[in-house]
Image (tube, rainbow, N blue to C red):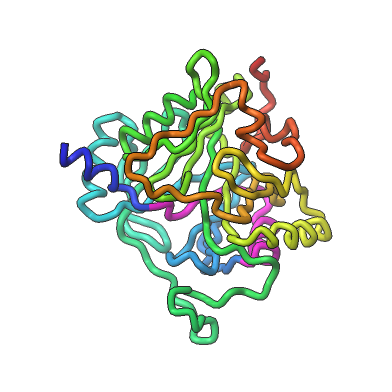
Amino acid sequence: MLEQELKQFDVAQLAHVEIYTPVPEETVWFFKELLGMTEVEREGRSVYLRSYEDHYHHSLKVTERNEPGLGHVSWRASSKNALERRVKDLEKSGAGKGWIDGDLGHGAAYQFVTPDNHNMEILWDVDYYQCSDDKKSPLKSRPEKRPITGIPVRRIDHVNLMSSNVNRNKEHLMNDLGFKLREHVVKNDGDEIGAWLSVSPLVHELAYMEDATTSEQGLGRLHHLAFWYGFPQHLHDLSDVLTEHGIEIEAGPLKHGVSQALCMYVIEPGGNRIELFGDSGYLIFDPDWQPVKWNEDEVEQAIIHYGAPLPDSYFKYGTPNVKAPVKN
């Protein structure tokens, strides 16, 4: 029992996410000039970026590929021992792919794959961001001055993945990595439309939503990657900036029922959907938290607490984009 309780805290946080883009310079321009992120390094076809309150070397890796999509999701363990425990569970489950020596910004990482073929890794050793003296903030808890470019995001928040079977993918995260279910939308037959999970007081670091396509090509798709502002006004400021620079705003600003977050969705130049969080919604400190369940007839309230309805593209479009039949 004690070992099982310890395992609940083996994964500490979302460390970084890699996305693919066919137009790397345009994508990097979006994150640097409009979202105010800092370019840390470049290597090969990849650019490493971070937000001004991200403490690690990078929180975003942008890699050139022929189409947009997810490269991988990286999780940091809470200790070396926690990493070893989680690797054993991943190996037993058959999800493990094996170790890599590391990458810019972190040491050895154990790679694994979800039931829907989303690539992930878990690691312990990380490099912390070291800024130059002229960029140091007088706020000692902040690793860098707040940028004066664009409407700067503060930190990475979460990732949302499209899934052919939400239940199965959710169980994988809970059983092999110790994630806790925070909220979910459940159909009348018991299958889940969406599930929001976390390892911290956040409502979610990762969410799964049902993929509307029926093609095997749809496995492993990214729905969106989210960054956090903390101030709702920034979404309105950003809306103005994005519109003037020809960036598509898919939806919002609006407030979700699930998570209570005020947010907006945009499509970056490479084609990936990016969510911007204007506030954190709510935090969970109750150790005996019971997952919030939304029923099938409550889907609209779960998605929209207030604001315009989400467009059809929100439920069908993901990256890479696939032309496939849609579930009824």
Q: Residue furthest bottom?
A: 134
Q: Is residue 219 visible?
A: no
Q: Nearer the viewer, residue 82 or 301?
A: 301
Q: Nearer the viewer, residue 234 or 22?
A: 234
Percent x, y for residue 131?
Answer: 48, 78
The residue sitting at 51% across, 49% down in the picture is 282
Is 25 part of what is drawn in magenta? yes
Percent x, y for residue 153?
Answer: 60, 62
Q: Is residue 247 above or below residue 146?
A: above
Is 47 part of what is drawn in magenta? no
Quarter placement of the N terminus: top left
In the image, taking residue 260 as reference, residue 166 lies left or right, namely left
Looking at the rendering, the stretch of residues picked out in magenta corresponds to 13-36
Residue 56: quarter of image? bottom left
Q: Is residue 245 above or below residue 261?
A: below
In the image, taking residue 27 as reference, residue 70 lies left or right, namely left
The residue sitting at 30% across, 46% down in the picture is 99
Quarter placement of the C terminus: top right
Q: Nearer the viewer, residue 36 or 279?
A: 279
The residue sitting at 74% across, 43% down in the picture is 250
Percent x, y for residue 174?
Answer: 35, 34
